Image: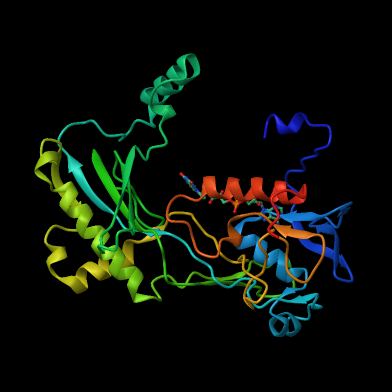
Amino acid sequence: MRDAEKRSNLTILTETRVHKVLFEGRKAVGVLTETGVTYRARREIVLTAGALATPKILQLSGIGEAEHLKNLGIDVIMDLPGVGENYQDHLEATVQAEVKDPISLFAQDKGLKAAGHMLQYLLTKTGLLTSNVVESGGFVDTAGTGQPDIQFHVLPTFIGFADRAAEPGHGIAIGPCFLRPKSRGTVKLRSANPRDSALFNANSFSSPADLDTLVRGVEWAIRIIEAPSLARIVKRRVLPTPGLERDPEALRDYIRSISKTVFHPSGTARMGRPDDRMAVVGEDLAVRGVEGLRVADASIMPTLVSGNTNAPVIMIGERAARFMLGKDLVA
Ligand SMILES: Cc1cc2nc3c(=O)[nH]c(=O)nc-3n(C[C@H](O)[C@H](O)[C@H](O)COP(=O)(O)OP(=O)(O)OC[C@H]3O[C@@H](n4cnc5c(N)ncnc54)[C@H](O)[C@@H]3O)c2cc1C
């Protein structure tokens, strides 16, 4: 972005929230922002607000399920029932253990230690601050299908959650997350007021297969954290409580209670072929049934990729750029 900022044909407006896309007939011609200022497009508009905000903007613009929009008093530009459907995300549970020696990241972000790391980074660009904290990971085929269905994120620290603090002291955490969720959620408008947050229903674990996969992932993580090769480092398992895994229902309850997003929301304006009623964009990322509007973010994924999403989303952006230049178009 720093290099892009120098381009003469680029203006970046931060703190500028888009409320909706403006249409003349079925042609997208500009955007309306929160402050009431509008910006007109000479050629086309590309929505990249992410899988939660892109379907909101589309619906506020009159693109979505016609009945739903009409009920909210929004003029329908294009009836696309797939907008805000098909929400998917990766969820992970956690297996955590106390370690014997003071070798984890515990307290490294406090006081003199934190200042030391900052200094080392500023002077040498090395040290702890070059770490993304997820120090290692792996992919496992827990169902024997020939394809991994679980990814592990391994962190040299205890980790907390939105509603509970991390265990105190030195620890290690292995987070198994399922890779190909079957559950599907929704992002729908609550009202026609852009300032109202959207109604978001992740619908996690609505497919029992997702919980089954995560159970196998947690069982694997327990085996890893208690493996003889880690006994030199690991003192005792903390989560889930040792022995809990012998009660299958208790293990499922633990997983349901502790699972959290890996922050990979996607799928809410999905790509599909022309005969696919629920597709929102075509193979060139253009929104179906209108002119001059594309989506280029994680919303367009028909199914969530089996891994981290940042690189695939960058690829989607690069593909969009080529499509806009008239390159690589599918015949
Ligand atoms: C905490 C966290 C950690 C992550 N870690 C990793 C990782 O380690 N590896 C990995 O591969 N992926 C990771 N991800 C996922 C990755 O960042 C996302 O998959 C990716 O950024 C999605 O790109 P996107 O373009 O779809 O949406 P975003 O990156 O969310 O971009 C959407 C942008 O639109 C803006 N926006 C929203 N609404 C409006 C509006 N109305 N008007 C104007 N602008 C608007 C937002 O401010 C945002 O800048 C992580 C995500 C999070 C949140």
- Nearest the eye: 107 or 137: 137
Q: Which quadrant of the rendered structure holds the C terminus?
A: bottom right
- Across and down, in percent, residue 100 comes to 14, 36
Residue 195 shows in this picture: no
Residue 33 in picture, x, y percent from top left: 80, 56
Q: Nearer the viewer, residue 327 or 310?
A: 327
Residue, x 66% and y 69% (percent of image)?
A: 280
* Closer to the camera in the image, 144 or 63: 144
**Image coordinates for residue 135, horizontal then vertical, percent:** 34, 37
Q: Name the residue located 71 percent from the left edge and 47 percent from the top edge.
A: 322
Going by the picture, which residue comes out furthest to the front?
A: 331
- Residue 149: name its quadrant: bottom left
Q: Along the line of sight, which residue is nearer the eye, 72 or 218? A: 218
Residue shown at 41%/56% (left/top)?
A: 162
Q: Residue furthest top?
A: 123
The quarter of the displayed image where residue 241 is located = bottom left
In the displayed structure image, the side of residue 213 where residue 99 appears, left or right: left
Image-based side of 120 in relation to 302, left or right: left
Q: Residue at x 61, y 71 (%)?
A: 84
The number of numbered discs placed on residues in the rendered structure image is 0
Colour scheme of the rendered structure: rainbow
Position of residue 17 relative to residue 118, above or below, is below
The x, y position of residue 188, in whole percent, is 62, 73
Answer left or right for 220 relative to 109.
left
Task: Check the picture and name the quadrant holding the N terminus.
Answer: top right
Task: Inspect this view and state whether residue 62 appears.
Answer: yes
